[in-house]
Amino acid sequence: MEPCRLQTTLTQDSTLVLQGLPFKAGETVEVVIRRPTPAHPDEARYELRGLPVTFLDPTEPVAESDWEAAR
């Protein structure tokens, strides 16, 4: 059986409606429901990727008091 892929959104009461299927009435079909995978798998892992970054004071020393040579 050739797979038919459709994307739809559940209604408010969690009802799924499929229209325009390429099958004949009375034909047996198999239904598999899953969430679509993201275009890039890393999108879900790195949610902040692509957001703007602001450096408040990029030339300020970091952990200056931790350096023994500075004492």
Image (cartoon, helix red, strand yellow):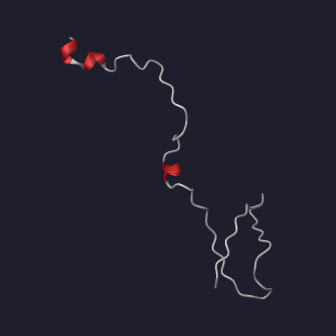
Residue located 73% across and 63% down the image: 8
Q: Quadrant of residue 28?
A: bottom right
Q: Quadrant of residue 14?
A: bottom right
Check the picture and name the quadrant holding the N terminus. bottom right
Q: Is residue 67 left or right of residue 46?
A: left
Residue nearest the observer in this picture, 26 or 56: 56
Rendered position, 34 above or below 55: below
Residue located 68% across and 75% down the image: 4
Residue nearest the observer in this picture, 59 or 34: 59
Q: Quadrant of residue 63?
A: top left
Q: Residue 27, how many percent across, how many down?
A: 74, 88
Check the picture and name the quadrant holding the C terminus. top left
Q: Is residue 55 left or right of residue 63?
A: right
Residue located 57% across and 56% down the image: 38
Residue located 76% across and 76% down the image: 21
The extreme top residue here reads 71
Q: Residue 45, how many percent across, how many down?
A: 48, 49
Q: Is residue 12 left or right of residue 39?
A: right
Q: Residue 3, how many percent across, how many down?
A: 64, 78
Q: Residue 51, how many percent across, how many down?
A: 55, 36
Tag count? 0
Q: Is residue 8 left or right of residue 51?
A: right
Rendered position, 20 above or below 36: below
